[in-house]
Image: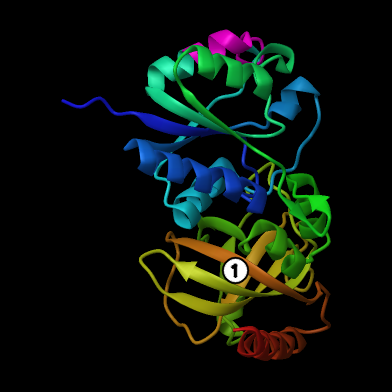
């Protein structure tokens, strides 16, 4: 029986942006050359939250990152390690020894700024030397630039927080997405003639600017629909402060409760607002729907 070999990309991959794309494409290329399995090793918790005691709002949950890596790059083998105090204190050489052995790694791909192990002592220079000593291949991907700036998750978070989904899409290389199970809501949209599906951002994931977006919704089992998606607290219909994601799917009728769906955000249409009546809200949703339809007609 032939032993499985892996070419592995190491990193956190928040957003899975065009900088990560260079790394993931190289991983697939090397795997094809070496007849190995392209793989990704990441962490469930952002290391900065423990190392620097810093709250890092994530672009995607771990499940969201895994979905993007598989869907956009065809890498099925995605492994998450739990990042804990124990993980943080593992010496860099012990960490790399353990994953090479456990995952049968033959080649490692990292970004230019990758570091790992206790106090970040596992630098890319040390990793390259380690690989050379142990007969492993190693690629260090240089910075990817856009508009004279290094592509980073930090900048993309700022764009999403501002609601600038079109610019965020340039830096991500794909639309910003949310995947979730469709939850039961107040059923008010159905009564207004604009039925919606209700979703939520996972804890720790960045919430975009509150407002209405031109979006597309992809349904479990296939099929996609243009949608208008409201991110916010629904001030016209609720006093609750929990942020929800409500999408009105154009040209769709049916029950989606309990099914998985993915929202792709394309363009900010207007800020969230409180209306004087449900009728006024319904009229605005119909205007939003027409604006979303026009947006996609113009932008393919």
Point out residue 271 in the picture as x, y percentages from the top left corner: 83, 73
**Left or right of 120: which side holds 53?**
right
Q: Looking at the image, which is closer to me, 31 or 158?
A: 31
Q: Is residue 298 something one can see in this rendering?
A: yes
Q: Secondary structure at mark 1?
A: loop
Residue 179, magenta (yes or no): no
Q: Looking at the figure, which quarter contains the C terminus?
A: bottom right
**Left or right of 108: which side holds 2?**
left
Q: Categorize mark 1 by other alpha carbons within 10 Å: few (<14), some (14-19), many (20+).
A: few
Point out residue 113 in the picture as x, y percentages from the top left corner: 72, 32
Residue 90, magenta (yes or no): yes
Point out residue 159 in the picture as x, y percentages from the top left corner: 80, 58
Q: Could you tell me which residue is drawn at 83 percent across and 75 percent down?
A: 274
**Left or right of 289: which side holds 139?**
left
Q: Could you tell me which residue is drawn at 35 percent across and 66 percent down?
A: 221
- Magenta-colored span: 87-97
Toward which corner of the image does residue 189 lie, by quadrant? bottom right
Q: Could you tell me which residue is drawn at 80 percent across and 62 percent down?
A: 209
Placement of 168 over or under 8, stated as above or below: below
Give the residue pinned by disc 1.
186
Q: Is residue 43 something one can see in this rendering?
A: no
Q: Looking at the image, which is closer to me, 86 or 96?
A: 96
């Amino acid at each position: 029986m032939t032993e499985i070999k892996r070419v592995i990309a190491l990193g956190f991959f928040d957003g899975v942006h065009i900088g990560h794309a260079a790394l993931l494409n190289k991983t697939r290329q090397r795997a094809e050359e070496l007849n190995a399995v392209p793989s990704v090793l990441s962490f469930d918790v952002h290391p900065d939250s423990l190392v620097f005691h810093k709250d890092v709002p994530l672009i995607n949950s771990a499940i969201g990152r895994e979905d993007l890596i598989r869907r956009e790059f065809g890498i099925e083998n995605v492994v998450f390690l739990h990042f804990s105090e124990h993980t943080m204190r593992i010496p860099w050489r012990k960490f790399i020894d353990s994953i090479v052995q456990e995952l049968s790694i033959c080649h490692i791909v990292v970004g230019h700024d990758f570091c790992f192990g206790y106090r970040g002592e596992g630098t890319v220079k040390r990793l390259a030397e380690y690989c050379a000593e142990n007969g492993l291949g190693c690629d260090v991907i240089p910075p990817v630039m856009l508009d004279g700036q290094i592509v980073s998750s930090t900048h993309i978070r700022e764009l999403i927080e501002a609601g600038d989904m079109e610019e965020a899409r340039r830096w991500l290389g794909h639309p910003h997405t949310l995947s979730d199970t469709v939850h039961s809501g107040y059923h008010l949209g159905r009564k207004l003639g604009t039925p919606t599906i209700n979703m939520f951002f996972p804890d720790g994931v960045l919430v975009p600017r509150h407002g209405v977006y031109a979006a597309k919704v992809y349904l479990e089992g296939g099929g996609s629909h243009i949608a208008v998606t409201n991110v916010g607290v629904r001030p016209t219909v609720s006093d609750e402060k929990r942020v929800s994601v409500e999408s009105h799917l154009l040209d769709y009728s049916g029950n989606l409760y309990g099914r998985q769906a993915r929202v792709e955000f394309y363009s900010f249409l207007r800020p969230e607002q409180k209306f004087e009546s449900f009728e006024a809200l319904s009229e605005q949703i119909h205007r939003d729907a027409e604006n979303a339809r026009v947006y996609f007609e113009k932008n393919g």
